[in-house]
Amino acid sequence: MSHRLRRLSGWEIVQILKKFGFSVVRQHGSHIKLRRIGEGSQQTITIPLHKELDTGTLRAIIRQASRFIPFEELRKVFWID
């Protein structure tokens, strides 16, 4: 069984995070800013709109999102099983 990250574009990640309650706040050049407000706090994540994100960048985005989204839910969409 392989446990590796999927290769995703910036737009694919934006669409995934929208399903978890994030919304687009603004875009500046090749980066888009998403925001989610929940339980008295707000979370902002910046996503580079590249054709394919490096695994380190993807891991950083997942780490930021996992502060408010259970890791198991993120694992289902970001990893290949």
Image (cartoon, helix red, strand yellow):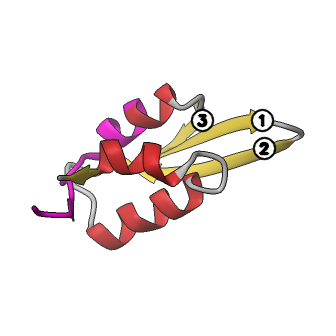
Q: Which residue is mark 1?
A: 38
Is residue 30 among what the camera can see?
A: no
Q: CA distance from mark 1 to mark 3?
A: 19 Å
Of mark 2 and mark 3, the one earlier in the sequence is: 3
Question: How would you rate the neighbour count of disc 2 (Cα within 10 Å): few for under 14, some for 14-19, many for 20 or more?
Answer: few
Q: Which residue is mark 2?
A: 42
The answer to whether the residues at label 1 and label 3 have Cβ atoms under 8 Å apart is no
Tell me the element at label 2. strand
The answer to whether 15 is drawn above or below residue 59 in the figure is above
Residue 15, compared with residue 56, is above or below; it is above
Q: Is residue 6 highlighted in magenta?
A: yes
User: What's the amino acid at mark 2?
Assistant: Gln
Q: Bin the neighbour count of mark 3 within 10 Å (Cα to Cα): few under 14, some 14-19, many 20 and up.
A: few
Q: Find out whether residue 47 is within the magenta segment.
A: no
6 up-or-down from 32: above or below: below
Q: Residue furthest right?
A: 40
Q: Position of residue 3 (x, y in %)?
A: 20, 64
Task: Determine which residue is flagged by label 3.
Answer: 26
Q: Earlier in the sequence, mark 1 or mark 3?
A: 3
Instruction: Name which residue lies at 33% across and 44% down.
Output: 76
Q: Please say if 5 is above or below 14.
A: below
